[in-house]
Amino acid sequence: MLNIEKESNKDDEKKEVAKETKNIKELGVTGITKSDESIQILPIIGQIEGHMVQSPQTKTTKYEHIIPQIISMERSDKVKGVLIVLNTVGGDVEAGLAIAEMIRSLSKPTVSLVIGGGHSIGVPLATSADFSFISPTATMIIHPIRMNGLIIGVPQTFEYFKKMQDRILEFITRTSKINKETLKKMMLQTDELLNDMGTILIGKQAVEYGLIDDVGGVKEALNKLNEIIKSKES
């Protein structure tokens, strides 16, 4: 009887190890939520992968992985706050905006930290948190929507692009301190990006324009998150 129990425990341990290994490989975390951690980390790294699968050589964050994590964090009573760590070149616009809206709708306190770059659709992902930080050397690139591949050159196509662009502008201005006209002007800048329109902001510049709340790193982000958690509890 004792041997059977030992074998059963070994099988359970093997299953748990296999599950943890799969989570590390697929999600970059050891588990969706942990019962002993009140602060959960949500990493958004590489390119945002949406409806189209990227090549194996491309580092991606898959939105079908992020969505269940966000829902799990919202449902868990153990989770008191969420730290979103960003280093993304952008990617699928609708998938990125969907993730940003979900982060914004969380009832748990949230803080974002841009550590390398928050480019393109990474901008609304950075501003989606209750409070945002950017490291001193991190960059943010603001540019208009770009589409790859074959598109039909009819008025309806351009109207669709305009509506999508307006959705992004509305979200960023709603979740940050930057005004819409300044944001539009930055998007249409022609002297900063080679063969493209847009603006690059480095560290403190993003704060000066009101896009990001403060310059800081992991320590500052965690301190702010704990401050918001305590404020909410009191």
Image: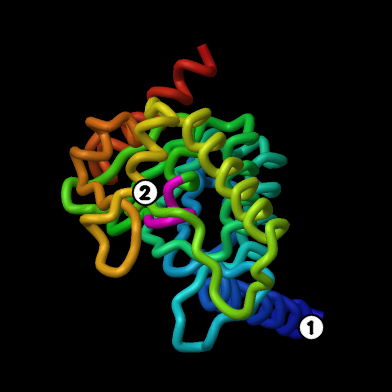
Q: Which residue is mark 1?
A: 4
The answer to whether residue 32 is above or below residue 214 is below
Residue 199 or residue 150, whichever sits in front: 150
Residue 113 placement: quadrant: top left
Q: Nearer the viewer, mark 2 or mark 1?
A: 2
Residue 121 lies within the magenta run = yes
Categorize mark 1 by other alpha carbons within 10 Å: few (<14), some (14-19), many (20+). Answer: few
For mark 2, does the 10 Å Cα neighbourhood hold few (<14), some (14 to 19), or many (20 or more) residues? some
Mark 2 / mark 1, whichever is N-terminal? 1
Residue 120 position within the rendered picture, expressed as x and y whole percent measured from the top left: 43, 56
The answer to whether 74 appears left or right of 40 in the picture is: right
Toward the viewer: 179 or 197?
A: 197
Q: Locate residue 234, reporting x and y percent.
A: 51, 11
Q: At which x and y percent is residue 183?
A: 39, 37
Q: Is residue 35 above or below residue 27?
A: above
The magenta stretch spans residue 215: no
Magenta residue span? 119-123
Q: Which residue in the structure is indicated by mark 2?
A: 188
